[in-house]
Image (cartoon, rainbow, N blue to C red):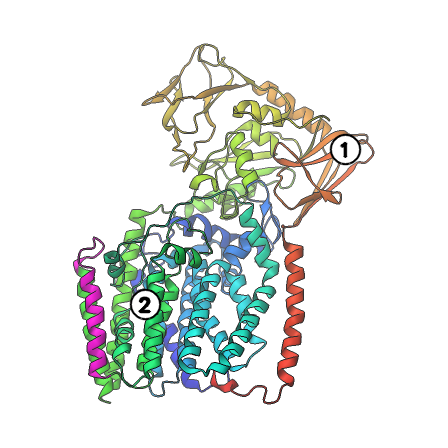
Amino acid sequence: MWTLPSARGRAAALAALITVGTMSAGDAVARTFPFGPRTRSVNDLGNQFVPFHARLWDLLHGRADGGVLLNWQSGYGTSALPDLGTYLTSPISLLVGVFPRDEIDLAVYVVTLVKMAAAAAAMTWLLTALHKGNGRRWAAGVLGASYALCGWSVVEASYNPMWLDGLIAFPLLCLVGEWARKGVRPLLGPVIVALAWVANFYTAYMATLGAALVLVARLLAETQAQERIRALLRSGWTVLLGIGLSAPVLVPVFLGARHAYPGWTKEFTPAGWTDVFARTLPATYSFFTPAVFIGGGALLLAGGLAFNRSVPRRERRVWTALTVAVAVSMQWGPTHLVWHAFATPNGSPYRQTFVLAGLVVITAWTCLSRGWPSRRALLGGGAVVTAMALGAGSSELVTGPAYLLFAAGLAAAVGGLLLAARGRAVAVAAVLLTGALVGQAAATTAYADRERPARLDDYPSWGASHDERAAAVAAADGWPRYRTDPGRTQLTGNDPILLGGQGASYYSSHTPEVLTRTLAALGGGWTSRGRSLQSLDNPVTDAVFSVGARLRTAPGQRPRVIRQDTPPLVTVRPAGPEPRYGTSPFRNQEMLLGAKVYESPVAGACRVGTEVFLWAPDHTGTARVGDGPEVRLLGGLPKRRAALTPLGTVTEPGAPVVYGGAAPRDAIIGCLDRDRLTAAVARLSRTGAVAVEVTDSGVTAELPPGTKGTAVLAAPRIAGWSCDGRPADAYLGLVAVPLDGTRTTVTCSFRPPGLLAGSAAGAGALVALAVTVWVVRRRPGAGAGRREV
């Protein structure tokens, strides 16, 4: 690639520059971070991606509790590799390490811009590999930027930055297909496939399907029949090698998803075609329709290909038919499932839209690469895009400004192409075509920036509140002697990795089912239908999980650290059959603690001196004890589940629980006796481990001589734990080891499921790749055509 004429490099740089400038301009117009006070951390960006990138920062700087295999900070101990492989294994994500940690929001924004710029450059390189387009390569740069600034990118993927890895992968995988078609670059091809699948396997899967369609189109349009089978075999082998190389990450990610708590599922319902046409216009917004906006110039050229007689008829038919077929496939249930790995995704059901955007851009370049389009082609293309715009007229998604932007962009694009076709004022033509894209895409970015916070949950960028909480957690931290929980009043669903500490909170696509069910049995709350687990502010569960310090934050007040004595991370329970959780979280907590610490209320009221806890998982409203402060619960099963909630200590006899609004159905009250809890903690501390050593992938505990029963590690028994050379047992959802009194040391280690199998597959693929490269390079004429792509 580096031996090719520099004009391609300049075109790719132009595409990247247009992309970064346009995205930044749109954010600045909307006064969105980092150009104004409006937060860009909406939905999963603030709730998942920013915290996970903060954990990546900690890993890069040696400050994380845990490593690449085990995350000690989230969910009382979770598998780290699936999260890394899902959210953080793009090479571009490493850029966060050069920023200060308290600028993590800015770091993620820069990562987002760099990914979009890389996608623009990669698409430009692909276009000029498909057709040289001598004298028009600057236009390939504009089209490359059109791809990177498509509606899907600026409206949806900009706050799901892992999806942007697919935006980069699609043109790169199409290049790999070109190399396979010509029998060149046998080493680089599989490496790029591997990088794409490691960066984000989900969008890489869609990008691979799209690249396969592009390869088939190229073979049908330009290649002789006898060469097609060889090209398909070479490309298939290249993809298999690349996926094999990615297996050490890919297999643990896949198995992590299988062990996750089931997410939200629904049947696919196609969007109305008027809404689909509406999303081709700039400045529209909707979460459940395909954001197909690609810029007036690209859509005009793509529509004009069928009318451009300077392009061979077969090419015109193949590319036009493929683009239309992919657009239709997004609306048909069976092909929708194929695009999404046979499962309708949570949230947006049109995540493959970037592939359609890429095909539109390739089709547009096919129209342009052999010469500036004639008036016939422009009239035909104009008729196509005008018909689509008119077809959107009855959609509620369209606004007057959207039509004005569409018309202005179309006029500028037509004017620029006519000027260029006449060979006059090419610089003016370039300004018109670039301006049409920049104006429409910047307006779409700004419009989306303003719409998202009004429709989605939003989270604050790092500020004074983050500083205060992080400092308080750091000052209280005593890991691994005890855990420090950043508190129930959350800034995000992943506060432990954003602010520090080792808590229960955890939100991921890989939230383990055993973790969700265990915390639910103990009275835990959740959002996102069980995948976003909340901290459980309860002294009994804090004792069980060795939470010795807990942050409490009230509005307008500085955070307070609440401390309590806790047993060590490894404790011992008596020998005997494992108990089973029931329906009462109070009884379940007592079973796991091994002592009775709750009293039942008498006549609906707790005894003076006891602490009142309310269990009403489906209740939304307030509650208080007597004249005490109100506490708010947020239920709404199955999406939200209110946690077991502390209401305060009883100070007057007969103080009732008072609800704001209707009393919840099936509410249960528990009265905690602190003296009993203190005695239970002392007993567990006396019989538990005398020393505990924690590593990035396990625990070693020293126990008193002659200890019998069951050693229990205060960590969920997720798949991957083994103790003393055999799979770990489970005790009420936690890691457990049987003891017979003959040993005093227990060693438990964690290895993500699939790591060994994936590593073996990766090693095999590496050997196969070496053999393939050796065979190819020994063939006569090896390397011929290298300069062509």
First reached walking from the N terminus: tag 2 or tag 1: 2
Residue 787 position, x and y percent, is: 50, 86
- Mark 2, mark 1: which one is toward the viewer? 2
- Residue 577, given in percent of the width and then of the height, sits at 69, 26
Instruction: Write the residue at 32% across / 53% down.
Output: 270
The span picked out in magenta is 374-400
Q: Where is residue 714 in the image (x, y as percent from the top left)?
A: 63, 36
430 left or right of 746 in image: left
Q: Is the magenta stretch mostly helix, strand or loop?
A: helix
Residue matched to label 2: 324
Say if the magenta span includes residue 471: no
Q: In this view, does 120 lie to the left or right of 542?
A: left
Give the side of residue 133 with respect to residue 398, left or right.
right
Q: What element carries label 1?
A: strand
Question: Few, some or many C-alpha atoms within 10 Å of disc 1 (few <14, some 14-19, many ≥20)?
Answer: many
Crowdedness near tag 2: few (<14), some (14–19) or many (≥20) residues, C-alpha within 10 Å: few
The residue under the point 17% across, 63% down is 390
Rounded to the nearest angstrom, the CA distance separating label 2 from label 1 is 66 Å
Inspect the image, locate mark 2, and give the three-letter code of the amino acid beneath it: Val
Secondary structure at numbered mark 2: helix
Q: Residue furthest right?
A: 742
Q: Residue 549 carries which label?
A: none
Image mark count: 2
Q: Name the residue under label 1.
A: 739
- Tell me residue 49's x, y (percent): 46, 53
Residue 57 is at least partly visible in this image: no
Q: Is residue 697 visible?
A: yes
- x 57%, y 38%: residue: 514
Check if residue 385 falls in the magenta segment.
yes
Report the front residue among 569 and 378: 378
**What amino acid is at disc 1?**
Leu
* Residue 420 position (above or below residue 451): below
